[in-house]
Amino acid sequence: MPRLTHEPIDSACLLREVQSTRAGAVVLFLGTTREYTHGRRTASLEYECYRDMAQQKLEQLQAEACQKWSLVHCVIVHRLGDVDLGEASVAVAVSAPHREAAFAAGKWLIDTIKEAVPIWKKENWHDGTSEWVHPGMSQ
Amino acid sequence: MNFEVKLFAGAKEIAGKDLVVVSLEAGATVADLRTALVQSLPALQETIEHVKFAVNHDYADDDTRLSPDSEIACIPPVSGG
């Protein structure tokens, strides 16, 4: 079941969760906190979500990925609250008998999570200002 | 009839609260809610055209009808990941 958590993401633990003797391929995607965006310096990110809907959407996406591709395991974790520079804010780990399915499912999952799941990030800039990130809206 | 609407992120920040109550006729749609929300909170004028609404945890079209027991949320463009 996908997880929304305030705790740091342990990527080694995620890899152990998805590894299996039935899998010939494991793909791990981590989205990490970048220090500079278009030359502007970030101090930290802050995430909030619409908890019930976000959990439900992540479960739907996980189920859909398992229908589209032949996967052995699929784990999704997204951070909430403050995330420091360099830390992972999201992780998608999938295992499959063959690499094509593992890469395709991992890419589809992170792309679709970013489009459809009600989670928002706030940029806390190094200059002390902050703003919610809403793609397509002028800041 | 009163409807509670959950607000998040930038919409919550603009409104200064995470829940707003709007009054709508019975049988009102998401489009009616959009109009009523801006009347109730004029500061949301620029944001409202960009937001989606969720009814009972699913994205809803503008012609979706609201019922009093619906859980309604205003969903500004998402930015997880």
Image (cartoon, coloured by chain):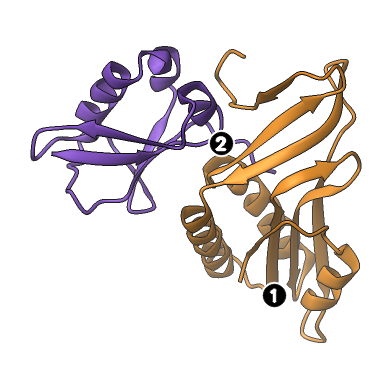
Q: Can I make out residue A95 in this image?
A: yes
Whether B7 is drawn above or below A110: the answer is above
A112 and B42: which one is in front?
B42
Q: Which residue is mark 1?
A: A73
Residue displayed at 57% across by 47% down: A49
Q: CA distance from mark 1 to mark 2?
A: 26 Å
Q: Colour of chain B?
A: purple
Residue displayed at 46% across by 54% down: A53
Residue displayed at 17% across by 42% down: B65
Q: Which residue is mark 2?
A: B78
Q: Colour of chain A?
A: orange
Amino acid type at mark 2:
Val
In screen coordinates, is A132 left or right of B52? right
Q: Nearer the viewer, mark 1 or mark 2?
A: 2
The quadrant holding residue A41 is: top right
Whether B29 is drawn above or below A129: the answer is below
Residues tagged by mark 1 and mark 2 found on one chain of the structure: no
Q: Dot 2, how many residues are within 10 Å of its Cα: few (below 14), some (14-19), or many (20+)?
A: many
The quadrant of the rendering that contains the C terminus of chain B is top right
Residue displayed at 58% across by 64% down: A62
The quadrant of the rendering that contains the N terminus of chain B is top left
